[in-house]
Amino acid sequence: MSKQIGKLYHPVNNFAVDVYEGYSWPCLCLGCFWYLYKGMVLWAVIAFLAACCTFGISWIFFPFFANKQHHDYLLKKGYLTGEQTKR
């Protein structure tokens, strides 16, 4: 089960995005569409191709890493932690 570990803030408009850790149930149910919803197009393509090659079995394993991938994706895009916005 995933739990919220905090928020990341957009560097320009300070919009908060919840960040989770653990198993991503929405990713299990939606598969590559979860990645598209989060804006992670490259990971959506990778998940789709992996699902095609493994006949959908890979969708069981992607949710174990999906929340960490989303967290890293937001940090790479320049999102800030709460401590960084106070400066």
Image (cartoon, rainbow, N blue to C red):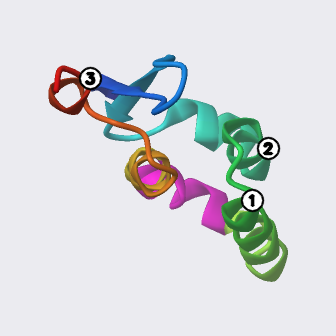
Q: Earlier in the sequence, mark 1 or mark 2?
A: 2
Tell me the residue at 46%/19% (across/down): 14
Q: Which residues are magenta?
A: 58-66
Tell me the residue at 45%/58% (across/down): 76
Tell me the residue at 40%/55% (across/down): 72
Q: Position of residue 41 (x, y in %)?
A: 76, 58
Tell me the residue at 22%/24% (across/down): 82
The verdict on residue 32 being magenta is no
Dot 2 and dot 3 residues touching (CB under 8 Å): no
Q: Is residue 66 left or right of residue 59?
A: left
Marks 2 and 3, how far apart at CA: 24 Å
**Around disc 3, counting alpha carbons within 10 Å, would you say few (fewer than 14), some (14 to 19), or many (20 or more)?**
few
Q: Quadrant of the N terminus?
A: top left
Compared to residue 83, the image places residue 22 above or below, namely below
Which numbered tag is attached to residue 44?
Answer: 1
**Around disc 1, counting alpha carbons within 10 Å, would you say few (fewer than 14), some (14 to 19), or many (20 or more)?**
some
Marks 1 and 3, how far apart at CA: 24 Å
Q: Main SS of the magenta segment?
A: helix
Q: The residue under label 1 is which amino acid type?
A: Ala
Rendering quarter of residue 81: top left
**Given the current orientation, which residue lies at the most extreme bottom position?**
53
Residue 23 visible here? yes
Compared to residue 60, the image places residue 25 above or below, namely above
Q: Position of residue 59 (x, y in %)?
A: 64, 57
Q: Position of residue 58 (x, y in %)?
A: 63, 67
Marks counted in the figure total: 3
Q: Earlier in the sequence, mark 2 or mark 3?
A: 3
Which residue position is annotated with label 3?
6
Q: The residue under label 3 is which amino acid type?
A: Gly
Which residue position is annotated with label 2?
33
